[in-house]
Amino acid sequence: MKYMASLETFKSLSPAEFFYRNREIAGFSNPSRALYQAVRELVENALDATETHGILPIIRVYIDRTSNPMHYVVSVEDNGIGVPPQFVPKAFGQVLFSSKYKLRQTRGMFGLGAKMAILYGQLTTGRPVEIITSPVKSKRVYFFKLMIDIKNNRPIVLEKASWSKKKEWHGTIVTIALEGDWGRAKSRIIEYIKRVALVTPYAEILFKGPDNSYFYYPRVTTKLPRPPREVLPHPYGVDLEAFKMLIASTQESRLEDFLVKSFQGVGKRTAQDLLRKIGLPLDKSPKKLSLDEIKVLVEEMKKYERFKPPRADPLSPIGAELIVLGLKQILQPEFVTAITRKPAVYEGHPFIVEVGLAYGGAIESSNEPILYRYANKIPLLYDEKSDVLWKIVNELDWRQYNVSFPAPLAVLIHICSTKIPYKGVGKESIADVPEIEREVRNALREVARKLRSYIQKKQKVEETYRKLTTFVKYLPEVALSLEILSINPETKEKHVDREQLIDKLLKVLSKKISEVKVSRDLINKVIVSIE
């Protein structure tokens, strides 16, 4: 029996078609997750378009039902810098076209999320995305209605228009119709908006759901985090392919100048020392390097110890002050503290760890700390138990810090970096990186020590209150007895007034109880409680 060998056929996929086929990679795996992910992606784009450019954010999020019970319209409006009209079609209709391909911290890394929401909406409802935008200082407002040509990864502009501004507005409004499940997604979306507001107390955020639920978070400060600045790559963070791409794009004709102009932390002396150590001529053209020479150069760069550490310029931490404001506004605790650590480095990438801690007040008691996880200011709501941050928080012996569970304790951890080490493509949990683990542990212990000091002081006050309560109960009787003893038997004149005597005894009592400073307010509080 003869068998004919079948011939395999080959074809290529455009980026749009690849992500269309694998949309679960970007979080659009089902209607519930897709609705949440669409809101998240559009809100994060809106925040990057405002605060990165020094604009106090005003974000409005609307979700409305359509005549189809499974279809929803998501609209997000911001007051950001707007999108120049010539870039709108590609910015919203071409996958892997973005302004975010720079070495600086942004919420989105690939410029993919909003376009995945558009693709998902196009797939499930067949309706185009609508964009209204007006750049800063523009005198006109621009409108586009477009879809994505999945096969060729290019925008299809269905309608476009423009009109003169009637009011001073700049920003962008993106409206997408997509299949969703509000019933299942509601709690996640509302929690996401709350957590965004928690780390952006400088933003004004309004959310309206399809069931007419409203959530409004007013701005409580006008202070913005410092904006990130684009920087050159650091030698420790560049691999072979990245180095080859830098060579392809350089205009430098000398290898020494190429190293100085293409990398941060490399000066002329450092470049000369490195090249002499390897044995490469300073004036050799980088484009004439052989593959073996490039390999040697990249390997030696990673071993070289005289490079300056990566700068923190491309990072934008929230800041301890803003974290405290956010925790106070959203959680209303009785005690709150926060810390921003100094920049650290892993694999050539700078990162900063920030930890906030809130205790008591309106926080509900639970059997473990309530954990708020953030990466580049993005709330992480899924895969909590697989995150290294969860492991660190729950491994800490909280008893050493006078915390016994159940307790009203919330912990916020934020990591910002030019490269967040996510565990998977879903970008919802942080991987176990020793440098990051060390920084998080040290920051967590520092804020926990401040909590321990607060609890100890609180316990001393409570103990003093108990002592005062016991003593003050007997003060009226003691004062009355002394008043009676001071009466002259013949004249019946009192030498001591009971009320004055009580005041004197209280002063003596407050001096005797020296564990904490006893104020008159505390004493009055005790007297009132007894009466």
Image: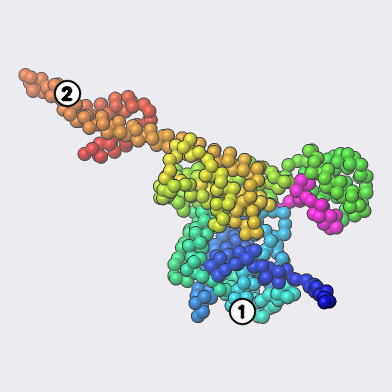
Q: Compared to 298, does 493 lie above or below?
A: above
Are the residues tagged 2 and 1 within 8 Å (C-beta)? no
Quarter occupied by the N terminus: bottom right
| The stretch drawn in magenta includes residue 238 | yes
Q: Compared to 474, does 196 lie above or below?
A: below
| Nearest to N terminus: mark 2 or mark 1 | 1
Image location of residue 367, percent across then percent down: 44, 47
Disc 2 residue crowd, few under 14, some 14–19, many 20+, Cα 10 Å: some
Residue at x 36% of width, y 26% of height:
514
Quarter occupied by the C terminus: top left
Mark 1: amino acid: Gly
Residue 87 visible here: no
Disc 1 residue crowd, few under 14, some 14–19, many 20+, Cα 10 Å: few
Image location of residue 70, percent across then percent down: 52, 75
Mark 2: amino acid: Leu
Task: Report the disc number at residue 35.
Answer: none
Secondary structure type for disc 1 = loop
Identify residue for label 1.
Answer: 126
Q: Compared to 55, does 256 lie above or below?
A: above
Q: Please give left or right for residue 251 compared with residue 334 in the image.
A: right
Residues at marks 2 and 1, CA–CA distance in whole angstroms: 92 Å
Residue at x 61% of width, y 69% of height:
117
Identify residue for label 2.
Answer: 482
Q: Please give left or right for residue 285 compared with residue 451 in the image.
A: right
Between residue 283 and residue 359, name the one nearer to us: 359
Residue 174 visible here: yes
Residue at x 60% of width, y 67% of height:
28
Image location of residue 504, percent across then percent down: 25, 26
Closer to viewer: mark 2 or mark 1: 1
| The stretch drawn in magenta includes residue 359 | no
Residue 158 figure quarter: bottom right
Instruction: Write down the region rendered in magenta.
Output: 224-249
